[in-house]
Image: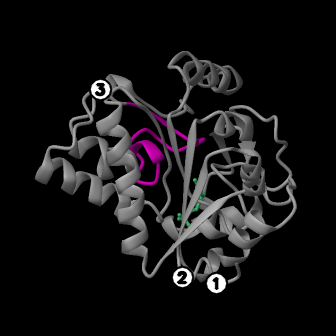
Amino acid sequence: GIQCTVYPSHDDASRAVADCISTILREKPTCVLGLATGSTPLEVYAELVRRHHDTGLDFAGATTFNLDEYVGLSPGHPQSYAHYMNEHLFGQVNVDRGRTHLPNTRADDLGQSAEQYEMLVRSAGGVDLQLLGIGTNGHIGFNEPGTAEDSVTRVVDLAASTIRSNSRFFRDESDVPRRAITMGISTILRARKIVLLATGESKADAVADAVTGPVTTGNPASFLQNHADVHFVLDAAAAALL
Ligand code: GLP
């Protein structure tokens, strides 16, 4: 089953996730980290940057793979996940930029680009620690409801509810990309360890369904029940329906 730990606040939960990442960086300096974007992990990255400056937390040997990237944003677009990672982590710690990876959504052949990303994750030896957020509809990465458990990295259409929800980061809902490349459910489940951070009451339904509901494509996060080492790090509001 999924192990859940509930913290009083978003900041406490973020520090707990930063602890997991700090521990693996110290125990295995050449670890492979699976990284997530969205508003939820911002304080995790801020805490890691602080630890890099204050305690010398070392990213020099780490390899990173992000879960997903929008299709159709110009390079350097402020809402691209590449830009997000530069701003909040990569530009502020000593990571080797040659070892940071996001899906390339500017390739001519997006299908081939997705396949190459899947192969790249495998050839790096697999992800040691995968950080996840969760959508209000239970999506992980951009694996929307209806996604099969054996899905791999591929081009996907975003759900209407995701476009609406993510429009808060754009000028207008019509500016939100309609497609993305995302790691698949099977890509995510191959990680040796998974930590999902969820905070706020808007996530309570999706979290409860993922943890206590049936394993179903209706809630893609419920597939995490099939993994041996998954930890949900929650604040009180996100855990309210457990
Ligand atoms: C986004 C991302 C996910 C993220 C989720 C929740 O669309 N693709 O990786 O976990 O939605 O986002 P937030 O943390 O902003 O609530």
Q: Amino acid at mark 3?
A: Gly
Which residue does the numbered mark 2 point to in the structure image? Answer: 236
Position of residue 220 in the picture relative to residue 81 (left or right): right
Which residue does the numbered mark 1 point to in the structure image? Answer: 240
Q: Amino acid at mark 1?
A: Ala
Considering the image in quadrants, where does the N terminus appear?
A: bottom right
12 above or below 99? below
Position of residue 195 in the picture relative to residue 137 (left or right): left
Q: Amino acid at mark 2?
A: Ala
Q: Position of residue 40 (x, y in %)?
A: 48, 65
Q: Is residue 68 magenta?
A: yes
Q: CA distance from mark 1 to mark 2?
A: 6 Å
The residue shown at (36%, 56%) is 18
Considering the image in quadrants, where does the C terminus appear?
A: bottom right
Asked if marks 1 and 2 touch (Cβ < 8 Å), the reply is yes
Dot 2 beta carbon under 8 Å from ligand 1: no
Nearest the eye: 222 or 65: 222
Which residue does the numbered mark 3 point to in the structure image? Answer: 61
Marked residue nearer the N-terminal end (3 or 2): 3
> Which image quarter has ligand 1?
bottom right
Say what secondary structure mark 1 lies in: loop
Marked residue nearer the N-terminal end (3 or 1): 3
Q: CA distance from mark 3 to mark 2?
A: 35 Å
Q: Position of residue 166 (x, y in %)?
A: 59, 65
The residue shown at (37%, 59%) is 44
Q: Quadrant of residue 180?
A: top right
